[in-house]
Amino acid sequence: MVILKTVESKFFQSEIPYKPMGKYVHFLTIRITESYPLFQTDAELNKARVRAGVKDKTTISRLSMFKRKQSTPERLVGRELLRNYGFMTAEECEYNVNFAMDNPDCIIYGFAIGDSGSEKSKVVVDTAFSITAFDESHETFTLNAPYENGTMASKGENGSKPGEVTSRINQQDHIRPQVFFPSIVTLKDPTEASFLYVFNNILRTRHYGAQTTRTGRVRNELIGVVFADGEITSNLRWTQAIYDQMKSNNTLNAPDPLDEDDVITAAKNAIEALMADEFIVHTDFIGDAFVSLINEVKTLTGSEKGIQAILQKADAEAKDYAKKHISKKKTAAKAGKE
């Protein structure tokens, strides 16, 4: 059963192939912070020293959003939906503990369970970088714990003097709102259902970064998808090309945040220019060509009937794949032990 009407079936595999077959779809995403998220390792925000643009050879520090900071929240949203609509239970498939190995999350995003089996992810996500420099994109907050009287100071308990600020004080760097991270999410050998499953996960995911905080709000703005027979440009090069576009248009107004409309316009122009230099076969849905596709996807995923149809088809494909290939791996592993 064909679900999409705006994309030709030739771009999709009829079933999930066991070996790479050379079909790719690339989701062109701009991740926009809408609160104060934390993308960090060892208590420091992740950053990298890189060139500002492709043409602008100035070296700057940029915030980095590592690949797992992007892919993990998106697959968790997908798992939540699978449980909500009865295609998976928490008991049969627990993330990073006990994978069921036969549902869309396990087959599309991959898993590894020691000797029990593994499946390589068909979703490829690389580190994303902020368009603006590190110094313009973060703030340092001083954190402490208030008492019941509404103050941040102690009441003379545990040997401290009344009115003294307690030792429960800390400084933490946070990423500012309206910081933009261009990111290309790639799905290898998509079926129609896996394409829609990953597409929906990107659209629905709202929180990234440190999961223990009450912040981390991020909105994903998709500007297009590219079907190709190979991989396309990197996140870093796309970000640098956007920077060059915005610099030439005089829309980099530091220390003020970037204007979203300016970023989206520069992102579209930059990726179109980069795709024109590619030496692979590709079909681009960018700008006006993308409008009808994203509208159809949003209509599908915005109704209970539509999302159930997507999940049902994705689940059937995953179980068929697991029956053909995962069970063979488990049998071979068991035989090897004996």
Image (cartoon, rainbow, N blue to C red):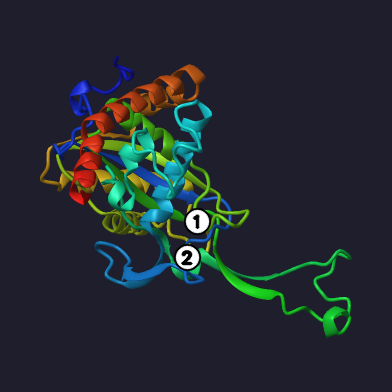
Q: Alpha-carbon neighbours of circle 1 within 10 Å: few (<14), some, or many (≥20)?
A: many
Q: Secondary structure at mark 2?
A: strand
In the structure shown, which secondary structural element does the residue marked by tag 1 occupy?
A: loop
Residue at 55 percent of width and 49 percent of height? 217
**Could you tell me residue 39's position as x and y percent?**
48, 61
Q: Amino acid at mark 2?
A: Gln
In which image quadrant can residue 298 be found?
top left
Across and down, in percent, residue 156 comes to: 88, 80
Q: Which residue: 86% across, 85% down?
A: 161
In the displayed structure, 38 sits above or below 31; it is below
State yes or no: discs 2 and 1 in contact (Cβ < 8 Å): yes
Which residue is identified by label 2?
Answer: 40
Q: Which mark is residue 128?
A: none
| Label placed on residue 209 | 1
Residue toward you, 54 or 79: 79
Judged from this view, the residue extending furthest toward the left is 279
Total of numbered circles in the picture?
2
Q: CA distance from mark 2 to mark 1?
A: 8 Å
Q: Is residue 159 visible?
A: yes
Q: Position of residue 276 (x, y in %)?
A: 17, 44
Q: Label 2 crowding class (10 Å Cα cut-off): few <14, some 14-19, many 20+?
A: some
- Against 286, residue 267 (above or below) is below
Q: Furthest residue to the front?
A: 338
The residue lying toward the viewer, choosing from 166 and 111, is 111
**Residue 288 seen:** no
For badge 1, the amino acid type reads Gly
